[in-house]
Image (cartoon, rainbow, N blue to C red):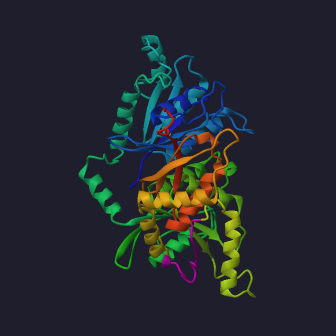
């Protein structure tokens, strides 16, 4: 189910990041009085009782290096935001007079907004605006300004109401609607797999091979897929949702332009999938881009499969198949040492080699992701690990783990109750994770381990 994308735009230093933090309910964006602090765009899912949406905080609309005027960049940024977003929040600063830049952006929004909504947000309104101030804002031609204070939270509830009202007008479904419930139930019946990777590694070709039809546009030109595309495929009497996503480029190549919104759509696809399939071109070396994409998967705590695609291209023809696979797996362990739990499949979209194994492997990973470990078994494992290797601590203080328990699944999450968190070296969690995996598996999924301080029953005595 598509989640709407709401984008905050406006010139620098009008309080966009502060408002972004207020809407998402936590301090995510860097807030500063220095114009242009938000150099990249921030992206966060906002959960609301009526409708969830993704919120994007953009950098200020300002002239880029080499541009003769600010107007060109205002038009470029606004057009991109309008093309890729479902709703625009246009922010102005009520503590200062409107500038020419505000009027330029508003003029463009009026011309090209079309059926997409634009909400004029008058920020920094600690008190209600007077008639003269309101009259100045009406000159922007974007209707009634919504008076809010991102810093103090005034008017935020009304802003939420306006956002939901506009998205309803764009035919996005509310959670209480019957159609939403039907789609949600349908999505829960099958696993969703998001295929991600840098441009031109064969994501669309892989899906076309799985579907046995040329449904998606396949091109040698990187970036052909601009948005996420869903396809339902049936295998062994089970249905799966395959999500093809736009290729992720290096950050410096997506700081400006439509490619950045493709990245946001890809992150949204990762957010709503069950298993992420990272495609690599096995005929080429692993790049920084590949590692950055893997890091995004890791941060999302999603299950993952690494697809060594284009395996029909033999880089070392003198090696046997077993030698080739062993050599490549060792190579990947060095490049993706931070996610050694991700299984590797050797595939070819051209010959369809091993492609169908994606589904059975995804099913297996899904079961691993929902596995629960009995508390007694988990603590036996932790005790054995500590007997083999005690946490170091310091001369004056010895760190202790009292007990451990699993508190959640999907992803599996464990809490270790300890005396003092700060005396545990960060590497000790990695050691414990390794021992837990050796004992209980969890193939294909990250597991989360965290310390929680708990007083010993003898401490008060």
Residue at x 66%, y 73% (from the top left corner): 329
- Residue 50 falls in image quadrant: top left
Residue 345 coordinates in the image, percent (x, y):
57, 75
Question: Is most of the magenta stretch helix, strand or loop?
Answer: loop
Q: Determine if residue 141 is in view.
A: no
Residue 58 vs 320, above or below: the answer is above
Magenta segment: does it hold 343? yes
> From the image, which quarter does the N terminus lie in?
bottom left
Quick one: 173 or 72, which is closer to the camera? 173
- Residue 87 drawn in magenta: no
Tally the marks. 0
Quick check: can you spot residue 60?
Answer: yes
In this view, which residue lies farthest toward the front? Answer: 461
Residue range corresponding to the magenta coloring: 341-357
The answer to whether residue 48 is left or right of residue 461 is: left
Q: Is residue 223 left or right of residue 273?
A: right
Relative to 415, 60 lies left or right: right
Q: Residue at x 56, y 20 (%)?
A: 98
Rendered residue at 66%/79% (across/down): 325
Q: Quadrant of residue 30?
A: top right
Q: Tell which of 397 and 255 is nearer to you.
A: 397
């Amino acid at each position: 189910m598509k989640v709407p994308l709401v984008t905050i735009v406006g010139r620098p230093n009008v309080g966009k990041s502060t408002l972004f933090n207020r809407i998402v309910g936590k301090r995510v964006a860097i807030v500063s009085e220095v114009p242009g602090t938000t150099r990249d765009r921030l992206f966060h899912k906002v959960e609301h009782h009526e409708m969830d949406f993704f919120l994007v905080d953009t950098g200020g609309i300002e002239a880029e290096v080499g541009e003769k005027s600010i107007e060109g960049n205002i038009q470029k940024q606004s057009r991109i935001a309008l093309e890729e977003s479902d709703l625009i929040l246009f922010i102005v600063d009520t503590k200062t007079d409107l500038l020419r830049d505000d009027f330029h952006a508003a003029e463009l929004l009026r011309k090209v907004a079309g059926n997409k909504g634009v909400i004029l947000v008058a920020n920094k309104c600690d008190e209600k605006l007077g008639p003269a101030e309101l009259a100045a804002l009406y000159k922007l031609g974007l209707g009634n300004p919504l008076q809010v204070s991102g810093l103090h939270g005034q008017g935020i509830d009304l802003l939420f109401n306006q956002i939901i009202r506009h998205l309803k007008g764009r035919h996005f479904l509310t959670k209480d609607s019957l159609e939403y419930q039907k789609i949600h139930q349908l999505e829960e019946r099958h696993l969703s797999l998001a295929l991600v990777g840098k441009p031109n590694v064969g994501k669309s070709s892989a899906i076309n091979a799985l579907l046995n039809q040329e449904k998606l546009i396949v091109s040698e030109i990187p970036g052909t897929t601009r948005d996420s595309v869903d396809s339902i495929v049936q295998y062994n009497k089970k249905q799966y949702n395959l999500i093809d996503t736009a290729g992720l480029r290096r950050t410096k190549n997506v700081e400006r332009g439509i490619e950045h919104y493709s990245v946001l759509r890809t992150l949204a696809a990762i957010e709503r999938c069950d298993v992420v399939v990272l495609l690599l071109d096995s005929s080429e070396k692993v790049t920084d881009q590949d590692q950055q994409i893997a890091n995004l998967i890791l941060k999302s705590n999603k299950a993952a499969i690494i697809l060594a695609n284009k395996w029909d291209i033999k880089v070392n023809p003198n090696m046997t198949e077993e030698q080739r696979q062993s050599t490549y797996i060792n190579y990947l362990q060095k490049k993706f040492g931070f996610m050694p739990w991700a299984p590797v499949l050797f595939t070819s979209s051209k010959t369809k080699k091993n492609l169908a194994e994606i589904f059975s492997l995804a099913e297996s990973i899904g079961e691993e992701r929902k596995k629960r470990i009995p508390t007694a078994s988990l603590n036996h494992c932790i005790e054995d690990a500590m007997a083999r290797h005690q946490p170091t601590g310091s001369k004056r203080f010895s760190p202790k783990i009292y007990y451990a328990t699993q508190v959640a699944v999907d992803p599996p999450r464990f809490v270790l109750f300890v005396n003092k968190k700060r005396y545990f070296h960060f590497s000790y969690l990695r050691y414990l994770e390794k021992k837990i995996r050796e004992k209980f598996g969890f193939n294909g999924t990250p597991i989360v381990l965290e310390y929680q301080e708990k007083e010993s029953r003898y401490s008060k005595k």
